[in-house]
Image (cartoon, rainbow, N blue to C red):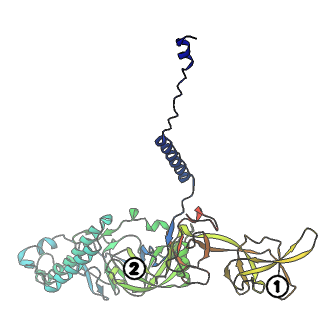
């Protein structure tokens, strides 16, 4: 064997060592774990807790109502240019002067001369009236109801009217010898009442006439009677409201209608001046099925005699208790078991029932079935249906009486998660709005303050664990 062959026999093939990249493996495991977690997150229900606290409900009690008053339209007995002397919203007596009609049309021109009327000066009382009207408008003005600016304008004009027309009355005596003599006719109140100078067609509105259409402000129109307007005989020139007995009608839903039926005496607040008053409510139903509440009052009519639509707030006694979201509330079904069949387990503390059971050989025995009580009445317990079923027989303690399980009933409640799992607790709802309910606290089978409940009851079932 030559040296070359000998060297060839000693040659061994080089095996490349296994090079494991630990970093890549760890990264891959973490990446797979993240993918699994993301998948589970988006495919599983998310249980969110809510801490129960004492609270009250803010209920929407503000309404825009329509006023029904004892109103009578007074028509002019003359033709010509009219001037008013009674302030709008002022009470006049029988035969008191309300307006005059100038047949010639020269009265205003004559009275505008300095010799006729002299200079008009506002007294302290006049200034006080103007300030009151301005402050009232400023406190209640809203850009959403700009049309009230025009009402305010007419109110101010009515305030100034009292001063200027008083001077006019004083001047009429000095004009008795001129060419206007016999051309001026005076209109006096045929009866006592509160004067108003706007006509809107709702003066004869009755409770039986109320429909949803009368609350459409877009179609509402009123005609304001002004000084120096040309009127014809028989035209409406003002109206008189005679009685302080009047009412405000508001649209209501069935729940509010039931509340007002149960307790018809309600306190209302007028948003215009923040004054409060008591009213008696009666429920009206229109031909189209709409519900309305007629709030009868015996005061404040004179304050709102110029307003057809009035913003009010109903003031109900606020219910205080445990405040929970409506999304937490669930309805659950339970078995009804007579009170006499409850017993204690071997430990002397666990509630349950003795159920009759049958072996394969036909022998009869009894077993203790622990259960949770969720509520009770004078005759029955509400018990969980997870360990019992319809058709089971339970034995009355110290007796041979048997009761076949068959009756069921439902309870309203929430899922308590204080112990880490969903545990149904009954609630007694005192009041609710569209988002929250006020429930009674510290009931035997219910909630207490600072308990944690499931925010969305649809995400869990009874006894689900909360992670």
The residue tagged 2 is 71
> Is residue 124 found left or right of 266 in the rendered image?
left
Residue 144 falls in image quadrant: bottom left
Number of the label disc, if any, that sits on residue 396:
1
Find out whether the residues at labels 1 and 2 contact each other: C-beta distance under 8 Å. Answer: no
Q: Residues within 10 Å of mark 2 (few under 14, many from 20)?
A: many
Q: Is residue 354 above or below residue 210?
A: below
Residue 267 picture location, percent across and down: 43, 84
Which mark is on residue 301? none
- Closer to the camera in the image, 330 or 342: 342
The one nearer the camera, 181 or 410, is 410
- Residue 217 or residue 63, whichever sits in front: 63
Of pointers 1 and 2, the one earlier in the residue sequence: 2
Q: Residue 333's spot in the image, x, y percent?
A: 69, 71
The quarter holding residue 242 reads bottom left
Quick one: quadrant of the C terminus? bottom right
Q: Residues within 10 Å of mark 1 (few under 14, many from 20)?
A: some
Residue 380 at x, y percent in the picture: 73, 83
| Res 191 quadrant in image | bottom left
Report how far apart the C-alphas of labels 1 and 2 lie in the structure: 74 Å
Q: Nearer the viewer, residue 394 or 102?
A: 394
Q: Going by the image, does 39 lie left or right of 278?
A: right
Q: Residue at x 37, y 83 (%)?
A: 301
In the displayed structure, would residue 307 be above or below residue 458?
A: below
């Amino acid at each position: 064997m030559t040296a070359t062959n000998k060297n060839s026999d000693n040659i061994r093939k080089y095996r490349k060592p296994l090079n494991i990249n630990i970093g890549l493996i760890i990264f891959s495991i973490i990446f797979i774990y993240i993918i699994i977690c993301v998948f589970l997150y988006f495919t599983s229900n998310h249980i969110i807790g809510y801490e129960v606290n004492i609270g009250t409900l803010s209920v929407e009690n503000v309404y825009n109502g329509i006023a029904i008053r004892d109103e009578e339209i007074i028509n002019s007995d003359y033709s010509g240019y009219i001037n008013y002397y009674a302030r709008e919203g002022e009470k006049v007596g029988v035969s008191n002067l309300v307006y005059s009609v100038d047949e010639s049309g020269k009265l205003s021109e004559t009275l505008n001369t300095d010799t006729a009327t002299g200079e008009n000066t506002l007294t302290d009382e006049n200034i006080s009236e103007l300030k009151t009207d301005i402050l009232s408008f400023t406190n209640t003005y809203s850009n959403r109801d700009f049309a009230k600016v025009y009402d305010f304008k007419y109110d101010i004009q009515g305030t100034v009217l009292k001063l200027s027309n008083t001077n006019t009355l004083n001047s009429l005596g000095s004009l008795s010898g001129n060419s206007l003599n016999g051309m001026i006719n005076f209109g006096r109140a045929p009866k006592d009442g509160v004067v108003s100078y706007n006509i809107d067609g709702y003066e004869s509105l009755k409770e039986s006439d109320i429909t949803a259409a009368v609350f459409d402000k877009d179609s509402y129109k009123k005609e304001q009677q002004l000084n120096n307007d040309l009127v014809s005989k028989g035209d409406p020139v003002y109206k008189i409201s005679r009685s302080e007995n009047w009412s405000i009608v508001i649209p209501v839903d069935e729940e509010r209608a039931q509340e007002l039926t149960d307790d018809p005496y309600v306190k209302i607040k007028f948003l215009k001046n923040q004054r409060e008053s008591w009213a008696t409510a009666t429920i009206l139903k229109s031909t189209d099925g709409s519900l309305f509440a007629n709030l009868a009052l015996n005061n404040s009519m004179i304050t709102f005699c110029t307003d057809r639509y009035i913003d009010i707030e109903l003031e109900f006694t606020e219910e205080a208790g445990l405040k929970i979201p409506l999304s937490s509330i669930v309805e659950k079904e339970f078995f009804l078991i007579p009170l006499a069949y409850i017993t204690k387990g071997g430990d002397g503390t666990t509630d349950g029932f003795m159920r009759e059971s049958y072996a394969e050989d036909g022998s009869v025995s009894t077993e203790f079935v622990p259960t949770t009580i969720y509520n009770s009445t004078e005759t029955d317990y509400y018990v969980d249906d997870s360990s019992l079923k319809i058709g089971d027989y339970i034995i009355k303690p110290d007796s041979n009486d048997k009761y076949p399980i068959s009756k069921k009933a439902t309870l309203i409640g929430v899922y308590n998660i204080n112990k880490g799992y969903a545990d149904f607790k009954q609630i007694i709802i005192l009041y609710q709005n569209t988002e929250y309910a006020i429930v009674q606290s510290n009931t035997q089978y219910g909630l207490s303050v600072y308990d944690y409940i499931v925010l969305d009851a649809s995400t869990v079932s009874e006894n689900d664990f909360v992670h």
